[in-house]
Amino acid sequence: MKSSNNFQKQACVKVLAVSALLSSSVLASGYKIPEQSLSGLALGAANIAAVDGADASYYNPANMAFLDADKSELQLFATYVHLPKMTYADNANTSRNGKSKDENIVAPLFHFTTPAYHDNWRFGFSVAVPGGLAKRWDTPYQAASAKKFSLRIIEANPTAAYKINDWASFGFGARAVYSTGEVASHNPGVTKMDMEGDSFDFGYNLALAVRPTEELKLAATYRSKVDLTIEGDANLNAYPYVYSYNGGASVEIPLPAVLDLALAYTFFQTTTVEFVYERVYWSAFKQIDFEFPNESGNPILGSFGAARIKNWEDSNTFRLGITHLATDNLKLMAGFTIDKTPAPDEKLAFELPDSNSKNYSAGFEYKLNDDMSIGAAYLFSDKEERSIANNEYGVNGKFSDGGAHLVNMSFKYRF
């Protein structure tokens, strides 16, 4: 195990880099929020092939081609995210036990789609909060590397769809992601770090929809890798060296590409079952190389900014969603998700103590009239306990509890 001083010197690199890493709508596991609409949350994001509203602009723009050609649609909604306390129990030293604070995040969102243009073209626009994180540890051992870090993300996603024929279409869009984060660590008498940064980065998304029969829907979507270019200010104090630094800092992190393959089938004209396989190409995340101005001439900054190998693994997510039309006005939805973490045991640390999860979700939508509807949904993310034995970041114990609760309220209007 590394000394607490050496462990802390590496922490400022790790914490900001992982915070930057979370600013993507395509995160595998972690504290991602892929549920970006009422049906998205109720179905656990198993709404790629059969999505049939304005949220198609975000989940599968190709499906916009199959919406009512004469109508625009606007979806307004908000998602409340509650992150319960996480518990860490050390295997060898109970003084290192700790609990994080619980966190609450509110994410207002909307989706919009236009009527058809020249019969074949449709356009959409989404504003989403695809990821967010707030983690605080006041217990001393954890606070030495992750006393606080928070991340707020907004994504603007303009999209377009072209209808090839009555049973096939393709879509595409641009992703503009703005993220801002704040991180802090405090190891009394050794080091103290405060850091803020933000980033404005771009990517694209592609989609294909095929409907061989009225009942069967197939879809494939792809979100590109985006390199986040985080820049900000750092305040570093290394007490044993009687050293402080106030100045710029930057790090570039690859956000991996994501591929979704989906199949939906409607039974008896009332019940649709959808399965989604998601592949997140986390193997692009090989190392973190944190940089300070004039780093090469300063041994302390050189230590903080040394490149560190991460070697994350590609991860899989499996989603199952069921939609049932109970009446002409009432739609019921439920979902189940198995989400695999990309972080190997030897790379796990306190700023993102991630694990595999199972998500359970349900919701409803009620049609007030032909053009307006309201709805609500709930999702529970159940994180597995994870035990780590003496890894390189000073973790030698078990993480438990944690998880997430999400609640969504929605209003839809067609005009």
Image (spheres, rainbow, N blue to C red):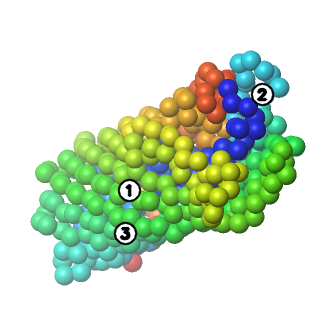
Q: Position of residue 32 (x, y in %)?
A: 52, 48
Q: Residues within 10 Å of mark 3 (few under 14, many from 20)?
A: some
Report, in whole angstroms, how far the alpha carbon at label 1 lies from the one at label 3. Answer: 12 Å
The residue closer to the viewer here, 103 or 269, is: 103
Q: Amino acid at mark 2?
A: Asn
In this rendering, the answer to whether 179 lies above or below 105 is below
Answer above or below: position of 44 versus 39.
above
From the image, tell me which residue sits under label 1.
225
Which residue is nearer to you in this view: 280 or 140?
Answer: 140
Image side of residue 391 versus residue 53, left or right = right
The residue to which callout 2 is attached is 97
Residue 173 picture quarter? bottom left
Question: Which amino acid type is shown beneath numbered disc 1?
Answer: Lys
For mark 1, give the secondary structure: loop
Q: Earlier in the sequence, mark 2 or mark 3?
A: 2
In the drawing, what numbered circle is on residue 101? none
* Residue 404 shows in the view: yes
Circle 1 crowding by C-alpha within 10 Å: few under 14, some 14–19, many from 20:
many
Q: Position of residue 224 (x, y in %)?
A: 35, 58
The residue shown at (66%, 66%) is: 248
Position of residue 387 in the picture relative to residue 69 (left or right):
right
